[in-house]
Image (cartoon, rainbow, N blue to C red):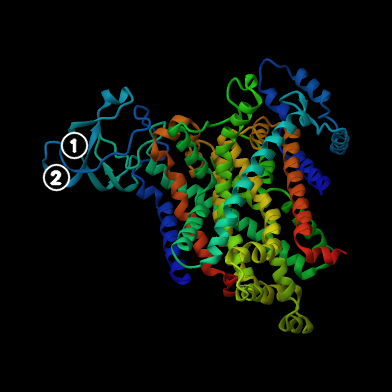
Amino acid sequence: MLLAVSALTFLLSEWAPGDFFDEMRLDPRLSDETVRALRERHGLDRPLPERYLRWLVSVLQGHLGFSFAYGQPAAALLWPRARNTLVLTASASALAWLAALPLGCAWARRRRGPLAAALGGGTAVLLAVPDVVVALALMVAALRTGWLPVGGMASLGHEEMTAAARLRDLAAHLALPALALALGMLPMLLRHVRTAVAGALDEPFVLAARAHGIPEWRILTRHALPAAANPLVSLFGLSLASLLSMSLLVEAVMGWPGLGPLLLEAILARDFHLVLASVLASTVFLLGGNLAADLLLVAVDPRIRAEGA
Amino acid sequence: MSRRAAGLASLVVLVSVHAAALAAGFLAPYDPAEQNRTMPFAPPTRVRLFEADGRFHGRPFVYALDEAAADGGRYEEDHTRACPVRLFVRGPSGGLRLFGVDDPARLFLLGTDGLGRDQLSRLLHGARTSLAAGLLATGVALGLGWLLGVAAGYYRGWVDAVVMRAVELFLALPWLYLLFGVRALLPLHVPPGRAFLMIVLVIGLVDWARPARVFRGLVLSARERGYVLAARGFGASDAFVIRRHIAPATCAVAATQAALLVPQYVLAEVTLSFLGLGIGEAAPSWGNMLSALQQYHVLVSYWWMWLPGLALVPVLLAWSALADAVAPPEEAAA
């Protein structure tokens, strides 16, 4: 799959007009010979299949190609950024799921009344407000109140702090983008949790449990939630793609140094290998997340384990 | 509110928004590119009926801005210069406009941006760009998805295998990353007209896979129906069967898909332009208008710069309500 993605992008890049060194040609300080020499050094004058093979070899060696703009292997640039994106998306999904599970259960229990109306209206509005606007609104709130730092990942003087202070600093910077991302995911998660739990609560075994006089709280946690777990775990895998897309946007708007801004800079600099590396990294995230979801599914659903055995 | 009523209401909203965008040249009081360099970020002009000393006018009027104060970044009305608001005035190029105001006053109902351009005029002209981009991109994605999906579902065999592998490939990437990746291959600085076409094509080409999968599923079940088998038994050509029997079976789903995709693509154009990868300066679009908010002082100080983002909310709400309303009943129940 990764091979196919990379081959496709390489092919497309061949049709694309211009490369990194075309922009350089506009610079009057550089002569045509210099540019040509640079192209030769980076192997851009070779035919396409050879370039692709060389790139593949470089991937196997762990370099992921060479960033023209930064003058170093793309992998070295990529890893810290990918780690930051992972931190952001993981904490945002934790936040969103922690909010969606209790709210969704409450919504499934009482399908009429003020709470259900508030949740229904809230999700409809949140779904319609673009993520950009949510992110910007949160930034205004933070700038106005001064409660949370806006932009970046660390304060000045981060290096001199103690470990605990560093962690607190990171959390403060993380809060805003994570909140924006969680708010973007929440309406979809909430609706699915509601549907899944409501479906489980309508099953005959819940009626039986009620007839036995088992307390409502225990019915919910012990009987309904495990039954609803299967679609929810699948949803976790499916929601990853939109989570990553949303994260790209939130990172770019809020200046979180993740994959998103890196990709954006790479595009603006026409730094092809870096673009390719970022896109591939996002695919790896997605595939890894789906794998994790599948494994989790086996862990929580005894029916699937029985099938496999 | 019933589904039907919600659908009708959203239809009314969408028709009026699109009509307003189409009539932008008539409704907008100024040219969207007309700059007033002395009046950056001017607040919305107040339309009054009473003068400062309490005199009443039957015709609404506005005060001209005090140029001396404007130089210091403050905007104060010059109470000696009242200029009436007139309906159906001629613009500088001779076109008819719904309303305007006599010189030297300016009527900025929604304020101005950093170059002193009228925000209302830009909002209306920008709606044209952004909404049209969404509609056309949907046309491209649905058309391509329909062709490939129907071909895969109808002919099966190697066509099906190739198309479905490609679908999996496209769906394996987070779509914004894919969109940006494809965008990265195209030149950065292009004139607005070509940029518009480019955006439409990129969005459409990147996202054909989802509709293609839906259509393939539909065709797979439709081709086994009795009337299709009968038609083929009578020796009808493939083209005839597809046109006469397969295409009608996909209509309802195509409508639902369109209602789901258009808002996403409007948003995609806004996102690309917001980040500077879409339609560039001069031609307004909701995305590049919003990109002014990337500067913190604009973000915090001038609420009218938010309007393109807020205008998106009713449009997106209406599209999702419409998608609910046109979905086949069994889908809506699930």
At which x and y percent is residue A213? 60, 72
- N-term-proximal mark, 2 vs 1: 2
Which residue is painted at 75% across and 56% down in the image? B167
At which x and y percent is residue A209? 64, 73
Amino acid type for the residue under numbered disc 2: His
Q: Which mark is residue B57?
A: 2
CB contact under 8 Å: marks 2 and 1: yes
Which residue is painted at 60% across and 37% down in the image? A251
Give me the C-alpha separation between circle 2 and circle 1: 10 Å
State whether residue B147 appears in this view: no
Callout 2 crowding tier (Cα within 10 Å): few <14, some 14–19, many ≥20: few
Which residue is painted at 58% across and 54% down in the image? A100
Quarter in which the N terminus of chain B is drawn = bottom left
Judge from the rendering whether residue A146 lies leftward or rightward of residue A10; answer left or right.
left
The residue tagged 1 is B82
The foreground one among A309 and B73 is A309
Q: Chain of mark 2?
A: B
Quarter in which the C terminus of chain B is drawn = bottom right
State whether residue B174 appears in this view: yes
At which x and y percent is residue A253? 56, 37
